[in-house]
Amino acid sequence: MNDKDRINGFQREDLDRLKKELDANPDAGRFKLRAKNRWIDGAQSLNLVSSFYGMSREFSARSTPFIQTTDAPTVLLGKDVGPMPMEELLVALAASVTTTLSYRAALAGIQVEEIECEVEGDVDLQSVLDTTEVASRGFEQIRVNVRVKSEASEELLAALCAWSPVLESLKRPVPVTISVKKD
């Protein structure tokens, strides 16, 4: 295969096949994504991402599960062996914007040479320990800055970035339920 058979790191043939499959069977695009977390000590916990449902079938385990530690910086009494969960949310947003831009640009035939996404959020972490519930919980504001090397216009690139599912999930309320079972 040569360079004309690839766009933005995707094989054009594979991208076209995936698009046709999803167009023919929209339910195949309905995924159930899963993550597990186990507390270790203090602010430290271990995250596992392995199984998921998608493309109309169950994937019980990836060949190599993704394992990551989250923690807090020492100033917040953590051991600083991994990012904080709120930082993970920013990572997910940056990765989603970048990946979405890459996919959508490729589908539109737009060559992208480079994408860099920086995300910054304002949060009052006092809310974790505040018993008066005065402090705001969660991010108060998030700023996403994307730098792209491409011949496409900034307006078009911004429109492609806006398709990010993580961005959309953060912009609108998503119902979340919590169930606690005591051992």
Image (tube, helix red, strand yellow):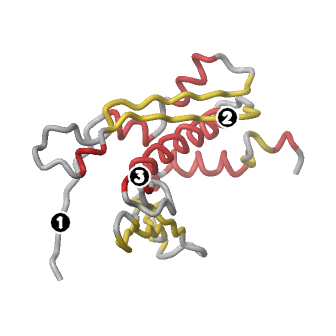
Indicate which disc, 1 or 3, sits on the residue closer to the N terminus: 3
Question: Which quadrant of the view contains residue 165?
Answer: top left
Identify residue type, mark 1: Ser
Indicate which disc, 1 or 2, sits on the residue closer to the N terminus: 2
- Residue at the (73%, 32%) spot, across then down: 112
Q: Which residue is mark 3?
A: 75
Pointer 1 local density, CA inside 10 Å: few below 14, some 14–19, many at least 20? few
Q: Residue furthest bottom?
A: 183
**Dots 1, 2 in contact, CB < 8 A:** no
Q: Is residue 148 above or below residue 60?
A: above
Circle 1: element type: loop
Front position in the image: 23 or 87: 87
Front position in the image: 124 or 53: 124
Pointer 3 local density, CA inside 10 Å: few below 14, some 14–19, many at least 20? few
Identify residue type, mark 2: Ile
Q: CA distance from mark 2 to mark 3?
A: 33 Å
Residue 138, position as x, y percentages in the image: 29, 41
- Residue 115: image tag: 2
Q: CA distance from mark 1 to mark 3?
A: 31 Å
Question: Which quadrant of the view contains residue 157?
Answer: top right
Q: Residue furthest right?
A: 2
Q: Nearer the viewer, mark 2 or mark 3?
A: 3
